[in-house]
Image: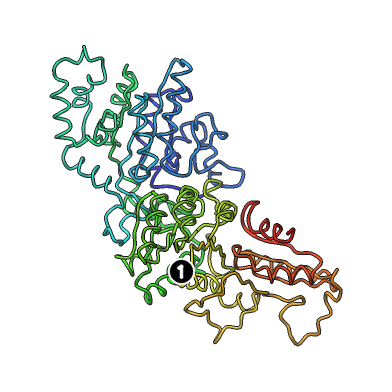
Amino acid sequence: TGGHLSSSLGVNELTVALHHVFDMPEDDIIWDVSHQCYPHKILTGRKERMSGLRQSGGISGFCKRKESKYDSFGAGHSSTSISAAQGMSVAKSMLNKRRNNCIAVIGDGAITGGMAYEAMNSAGYLRSRMIVVLNDNGQVSLPTGTPSAGGTVPASQLSTYTSNLLVSQPFQDFRSFAKNFNRLFPEEIQGLNKRIDEYARGIVSGGTLFEELGFYYVGPVDGHDLENLVPILERLRDSPDNKPVLLHLKTVKGYGYPPAEAASDKMHGVAKFNLGTGVQIKGKGGEPSLTSIFANALIDSATEDRSIVGITAAMPGGTGMDIFGRRFPKRTFDVGIAEQHAVTMAAGMACEGLKPFCCIYSTFMQRGYDQVVHDVAIQNLPVRMMLDRAGLVGNDGPTHHGCYDLAYLGCIPNLTIMAPSDEIELKNMVTTCAGYDDGPTVLRYPRGTGYGAKTLQKLFGYQLKNGEIPSKGEVLPIGKGRIVRPAGGFDEDQINTRGMERKDRVAILSFGTRLHESLKAANEIEKQDSSLGVTVADARFMKPLDVDLIRELADDHSVIITIEEGSIGGFGDHVLHFLTL
């Protein structure tokens, strides 16, 4: 079925140790992001259902509370586990529950998110009883090592910090851990060595950062050594102290499977693959992805305009910033899993005259919503927000569907929101965003590929020079759509007797890449009814709406059908609102 392979392989031993030591579901184990939860699912009664992983009617690729009582907290986005674990710990304490063991497992990528530090600061202050397991595998972004302004190292100073811990001190075994463990017992038991121990640990291990946040730091520990992990976890479980603990584990992503160890980033998320070789079984090569088309169009614009820069929040591979970074490394900024920071950093760049393209998945932009409003829109700063994965994304499920951006962005003032119907329009809109300095712009496009020149000519009615897609985009007029298909189709030589009366004329007004399905539907409908005439229009923009186009369609047709890939409150609602004025 494919899925998140390397992440799950890297926590096999940890998962076994956690389930051996703790008693779920009375104890809570919260997996941050939860893409590494496959071993957990296998151990909690879902082994026989793994063949339906990420399939319709099957089990989720992430933790999901309604799927199993052993999934303590649902996830899909990052940096939420410590907050959730703290909330559970506080609740167990207030309700006087017999056991209070809450474990948050978070990776070195997810811990770069600001929410993780907010939670650690709070946990130390409130002395919430909890264990944070830092799964440190050295991969912060996907893929780690994309050329950028920070070089090719992981996009996190914290990653450098934890790496230094590993260099400055060998793996801690249970014997060395036990020597320091008395710090979690009442002070009268600890004796005079407490101050000496704290000083020595701060100097030798470098765990001071976490200890200053109020955590007892344990580590670094080999995350693949079960014989060492189990007694350490048992001792932490049985501690009478309420001080939160951070257990720092060093793991290898893809551990135990050589192809995954050798290419942990490429095998982070996989399609079906050959178990013996690790070679992924992919479909025949087709048209380029919209992500790569966007990246190359941005490179074209950046070649002519040195003020263009690209920003990503730990997803260079998913947003095309890896392609852009190879061409313009010094103009590429990977800020880690920090969408809020990415948006406001872009706003700061715009203040000083740069043209930032802030490239974030639609679903992840939800995490930077206040920054879009407060830092960008209210100040009307020309930040270009590129929303990849806008629409349904398939197997990753509801946490990753880009369904809500039109609804949550449509109500914000000063935004110009556009969506391409095809790869030519995508190039045009990237060029349009690059040249628009009067305010913030949003360009949304889905996961998928282009259609190719043949389809664009036959179905979309393009007249391409030499049958080739233009290499560069053109600037579009802001807020202007277009009629793509007149009633009766594109054959100008054929006498058109369709839709002679208004009651026989229907208009389909599409926004985004569903224009393809709209054109096919128009052809099918006209085949079934010789009197009916179907006009298909491409809105191009949701804000501002092309009100002249909408008036024209409303005057000439008895029915208008709006098509979009999003939730209620989006494009169709904006059209309906205008028509009711």
The residue lying at 34 percent from left, 62 percent from top is 332
Residue 97 visible (yes or no) = yes
Residue 52, position as x, y percentages in the image? 56, 44
Left or right: where does residue 228 sit relative to residue 394? left
Return the residue at label 1. 437
The answer to which of 212 and 150 lies nearer the viewer is: 212
The residue lying at 20 percent from left, 43 percent from top is 164
Residue placed farthest to the front in the image? 379
Left or right: where does residue 541 sit relative to residue 111? right
Quadrant location of residue 278?
Answer: bottom left
Residue 191, position as x, y percentages in the image? 16, 14
Residue 451, position as x, y percentages in the image? 57, 71
Q: Amino acid at mark 1?
A: Asp
The answer to which of 91 and 488 lies nearer the viewer is: 91
Left or right: where does residue 217 sit relative to residue 414? left
Residue 236, position as x, y percentages in the image? 31, 23
Q: Is residue 91 above or below residue 396?
A: above
The residue lying at 42 percent from left, 36 percent from top is 81
Quadrant location of residue 520?
Answer: bottom right
Residue 394 visible (yes or no) = no
Q: Is residue 203 above or below residue 543?
A: above
Q: Is residue 459 above or below residue 370?
A: below
The answer to which of 446 and 256 lies nearer the viewer is: 446
